[in-house]
Every structure is written in C-alpha cells, then in structure tokens.
Amino acid sequence: MSRINECILYRDFSQGQLLRQMDDLMEHRDEEWDDHRKEEWFFCLHELAELAGQYGFFGNLWHAYLTFLLVSHENPFSKACEIRGQVEGSINELARHDFAIFRELFALDLTALDRKAGGNCAGYFTDYRHEDGNSREFNHRIRDRIVETAACLAASADVQEFWQHMVDFYKDFGVGKFGLHKAFRIVHDEKGQVVISPITRIAHVQLEDLVGYENAKQKLLENTEAFVSGRRANNCLLFGDAGTGKSSSIKGILNRYYDRGLRIIEVYKHQLQDLNEVIAQVKNRNYRFILYMDDLSFEEFETEYKYLKAVIEGGLEKKPENILIYATSNRRHLVRERSSDKLELMDDDDLHSSDTVQEKLSLVYRFGVRIYFGKPDKKEFQHIVKVLAERHGVNMPEDRLFLLANQWELSHGGLTGRTAQQFIDHLLGSASLPDVQQ
C-alpha cells in the first residue's frame, strides 16, 4: 500500500495530484522505467515549475510543495493549532504519525529519480531561482515563511522537531485559506453554494498612510484592539464625506492586526442574504473576522437592510464572539429618508405612521461605534498635501505647491484626502513640471 494512503489526518489534498504521481514513481523506483514512467517524471517536474511560477517558491521546490500541502490542509490538528499554537490530547500523536510519513517524502532523492528517467534537470529543482520572485497568490511574507519552513522541515532531526515546526507555523499564520490570506470575498460555486474566496491582490495600506483624522483612527484602533484581544467590542460604522479615508482606515486596520489573527470578508449589498451561511462557516475558527461592507447605503425601495439588522441583533442563536461588522457609508443613517416619511408623523389618523421612519433609523443604532470622517478645511487640506509631498519626495516651493493644489481641488472633487493624493500622483507623473524633483 502507498505510504501516503497510511496518513490519518493529512489526506485528500486539494492540490494532491502531483503528490500521488510522485508517490507512484517512488513505489516503482527499483524497477526499470518504461516511456510512460519517464513521461510521468518529466510531467511532475513540469508541475513543480508551474507551482513555482504561481506561488513564487524557490529553493527546493519539492520541499516547498510538500510544505504548501501541510500548511493548506485543514484537519482537526491544524485547525486546533491555528493562531493558538500547541494543544493537548491524542490528536498530537495522530499528527506525529502522519509527519513520520512526510519525513520520508522530504527525504526523496530527486536526482536518483531523474537518472532513472535519463534526465539531468533535478539540480534546477533542488535549488530553484526566481527572476523576480513574485507570487500571484501570496504576499512575500507568507511565501518566504513557507520556503523557510520547508528548509526547517527537511533538516528536522526527528518527528518531534518536524511536529514543532508545523505547530509554530499554525500558531503564527493559521492554516488553509484563512491562514494564508488576509482578505476574502463571497462567491457562489457551480451548485449555488456560498464560498468564501481569497482576495490575492489587496492594497497594503497602513494607518500611518492616512494623514490626519487622528481621533477617528484612535476610536477605530481602540475598538479593533479590544476585538482581537478577546474583549467586548462593537460593530462599527465609519460615515462621512467621500474621499476622506474611511475605506483606507479599514484596510489599515487589517494590515495592522493580521498578525494577531484578524481577517476581513468583503460583503456587497446584494450578498447580505448570504450572511448567515458565511457566519456558519467561520464562527468556530480561531481567527477574528470583520465582515466589511464598503459604501453601504439603501434606497427607500430596497429591503436588504433587514437581513443586516437580523444578523446584528436578531434570531435565537447567540452572535459569535469572533465576528464583527464594519461598514463605511456616505450616509449617516444608511437608509434614505423620504420627506413623506416625516410628513406621515403628523398624520393623526395613522397611529403607526412612525414605524417606517423608526425601522430605517434602527439599523444605524445597531452599530455601537459610529465614527465621523469629514472633509478637511483649507488649512488641513494644505497640511495633507505638504505631508504627502514630503513622503513622496516632491521638492517644490511651498507657495507654488499650495497654489497648484488649490487649483487642482477646484476641479477634482474638492477638499478631501483623496483629492490631495490624486494631486500628488499627478505631480509625480507630470514630466512637464520641471520643479518637481523626486
């Protein structure tokens, strides 16, 4: 029987076809290979090269691939260790049983198999080098940690050391898609089922990148710090003028607290009906999830907000402690109010005329923290421009810088942080401005 079929926890890998093919070659390594076996070997090398291109792996690609399988596989052991680290119980012995088998896979001599196939390419795969090292799937920090862990696993003196390296990875990053990615979106598979899918390209915004709004950022930080620390925290609404940094603040929060297990799931308005299924998929994980709703608002004829109200404070089931809702909106009350709603309040013939208004206003009150982001005044706008110019190396006399900035904002959205950033980007891309030095 194949050795990989003896594994107890680590089975049925989603990207395990290459492992099965290599295992088949290992079973027949003491035989003479026919053309079919040789072709199978070179196809395995092809697959390793493809994985290197997709994930940015370097060094020993076989070891990187095996490590990728281990850090991606969700099972009772890996999910118990995610973010928390070492756990007690018999599950550790089951993991060690499987890791003993994987140590044999790590010890596979690619050069010997390559010789049987009449090839001379194995050396390129045990010391693979990238032209640019980019990964289409992972950020560099995750990719580098996988490659580093691969080297540690290969050098492990025994199963216990191998086990410890895996526990350390699960503690620092987690496992599977939630461990290897920061942000996610909701999609539906071919059967119409809700799937939480990773977003592989996200903006690496830091809170420090947002100039000003110190009080607003501090309120957001305090609430999020409480959340990731396991203390009581509130759902949060960031409202105010467009272009003032509401969305950037949320992205900055993600990048600051990702190391402590914070993850964000982006939810669009038409997906609110999927919230219960999303919550069911993440409520028992060791991460902290923010359900992020950007530019949230509802017209008077839209009723999707009722799904959101029910999720926040409705139903018999207790709200999971590892989930909060963060939303941004240009509207303070989220739901557009009609003037007729207010007139109905004056109608003595309708005893329940205020229900419409109260139902709409009740949504915003379900956000315990509400933070206002307003447009800066002229002086604050110029301060933002000055800081951004210094940050990006724009060397220009201050009076000219402010003159150009004032001219720009008049026709590009007014006094906002976004307008200031767009103005600086314009300067950086304008070869026609000789006094812009970078």
Image (spheres, rainbow, N blue to C red):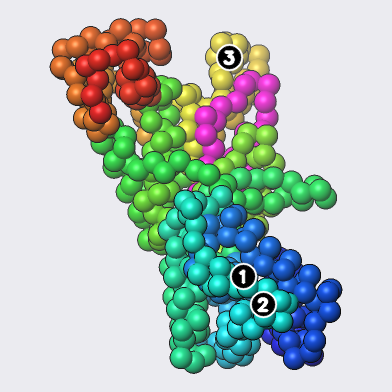
Q: Is residue 5 left or right of residue 404?
A: right
Relative height, residue 169 to residue 415 (above, below): below
Question: Identity of the amino acid at label 1?
Answer: Cys
Q: Residue at x 56, y 68 (%)?
A: 124
Judging from the image, what secondary structure is the residue with disc 2 in? helix
Judging from the image, what secondary structure is the residue with disc 3 in? loop
Residue denoted by label 2: 114
Q: Which of the 4 image quadrants contains residue 417?
A: top left
Question: Dividing the image into 4 quarters, which one contains the C terminus?
Answer: top left
Q: Which residues are magenta?
A: 286-315
Q: Residue at x 49, y 80 (%)?
A: 153
Disc 2 + disc 1, Cβ < 8 Å: yes
Where residue 394 sits in the image (x, y, percent)? 24, 25
Q: Residue at x 56, y 18 (%)?
A: 337
Reading the chain from its start, which is encountered first: label 1 or label 3? 1
Q: Which of the 4 image quadrants contains residue 351?
A: top right
Residue denoted by label 1: 121
Question: Dividing the image into 4 quarters, which one contains the N terminus?
Answer: bottom right
Q: Residue at x 84, y 73 (%)?
A: 36
Report, in whole angstroms, how far the alpha carbon at label 1 lies from the one at label 3.
72 Å
Report, in whole angstroms, how far the alpha carbon at label 2 lies from the one at label 1.
7 Å
Relative height, residue 247 to residue 74 (above, below): above
Please rate how many residues cluster around mark 1, counting C-alpha atoms within 10 Å: few if below 14, some from 14 to 19, many from 20. some
Q: Is residue 64 visible?
A: no
Relative height, residue 415 to residue 213 (above, below): above
Residue denoted by label 3: 338
Please rate how many residues cluster around mark 3, counting C-alpha atoms within 10 Å: few if below 14, some from 14 to 19, many from 20. few
